Amino acid sequence: MKKETLEKRTNIANDIMYYIYTHIDTNIDIEELSIDLGISKFHMHRVFKEIFGRNIYESIKSIRLQKASNLLLTNKYSTISSIVNSCGYSSQSSFIKIFKERFGMSPKEWKNGGYKEYSNNIINQSKFSLKSKTNFDSIVPTIVKNPAIESYYIRNRGYDKNIELTWQKLETWLLTNNIKKYKKASLFHDNPTITPLEECQYIACIIVEDDCDVKSDRIPKFNIAEGVYAKFDLKCKNEDLLPFIQWVYHEWLPKSEYETTTKPSYAIYENLDFVNDNLEFSFFVSIDF
């Protein structure tokens, strides 16, 4: 495959995935999307599966379920039916059936604490996370309203060594384009403490602060969503990241009386050092009241 063809197909697939995530609370119309992208439905499905390894409808189904499962554990004042509607489901009965197939329990059982054992099993799969002894209870977030943030990104499926390689590619891109002023960020489309780590969508992002003409044929861009966020400032080791996210979603959010939304959380890094295993970042979680 020619380089230009690969770039074009990768951009199409990324545009489709971005559309799904930003419209997950609606009835996603594939026909309308194909018209917007100016390509046939057949070509759209073929390109998406070629890049991501699964079809569009499977992705929509999986993303809806992950968003709903997260809202069920954080939004204690929301009914199951309102959460189902906010994640784009047309039928509560079909949602309950799909949920039981995936998690082995009903949404009500999950909402009433069943998620804890499921989440702990995922955390225990991570050798890094098992080392963490950090207590996060003293962290007090600030509430901020953030604008949309334009960022260049590479999408990675799974929490593995590929993440470090992804950042190396972005650093090469920065050097190639002579970009001096920028911030590193990561977008967490899924809650990695209730999603199998090999299925998580991790998005490595560069926020360009230089006033320069950026060449981005191979690196697509999107906007991190504007909104009201709880901002947590943290210095830690890599091993602390998943336990920290678990604490935010399972402890802080339910106790705070805030509710989260379908917008993804994200981190902006002051320091992202894989060699010395040092992280310093601000973690942003979308909230509503």
Image (cartoon, rainbow, N blue to C red):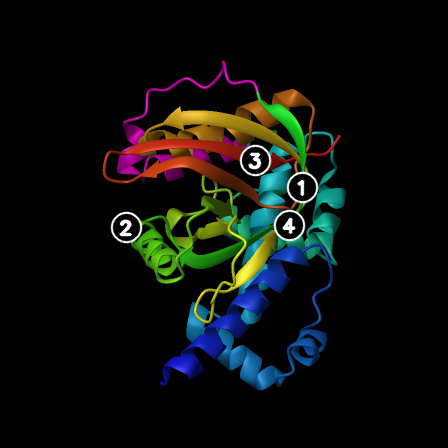
Three-letter code, disc 1: Thr
Q: Which residue is mark 1?
A: 261
Q: Position of residue 128 (x, y in %)?
A: 28, 35
What residue would you read off at disc 4?
96
Residue type beneath disc 3 = Phe
Residue under circle 2? 161
What residue does disc 3 label?
A: 284
Q: Is residue 135 magenta-colored?
A: yes
Front residue of 24 and 35: 35
Q: CA distance from mark 2 to mark 4?
A: 35 Å
Q: Position of residue 256 (x, y in %)?
A: 65, 21
Q: CB under 8 Å between callouts 1 and 3?
A: no
Q: Going 57% across and 85% down the picture, which residue do you hit?
A: 42
Q: How many marks?
A: 4
Question: Which comes sooner in the sequence, label 1 or label 3?
Answer: 1
Q: Is the Cβ of the residue at disc 2 closer than 8 Å to that at disc 4? A: no
Q: Which residues are magenta?
A: 114-140
User: Distance between the Cα atoms at labels 4 and 3?
Assistant: 30 Å
Q: Earlier in the sequence, mark 2 or mark 3?
A: 2
- The label on residue 102 is none
* Element assignment for label 1: loop
For the residue labelled by badge 4, is the local secondary structure a helix, a strand or a loop?
A: helix
- How crowded pointer 2 is (Cα within 10 Å; few <14, some 14-19, many 20+) is rated as few
Residue shown at 31%/54% (left/top)?
168
Q: Position of residue 282 (x, y in %)?
A: 50, 32
First-in-chain label (4 vs 1): 4
Q: Amino acid at mark 2?
A: Lys
- Residue 130 in magenta? yes
Label 3 sits on a secondary structure element that is strand
Q: Secondary structure at mark 2?
A: loop
The label nearer to you, 2 versus 1, is 2
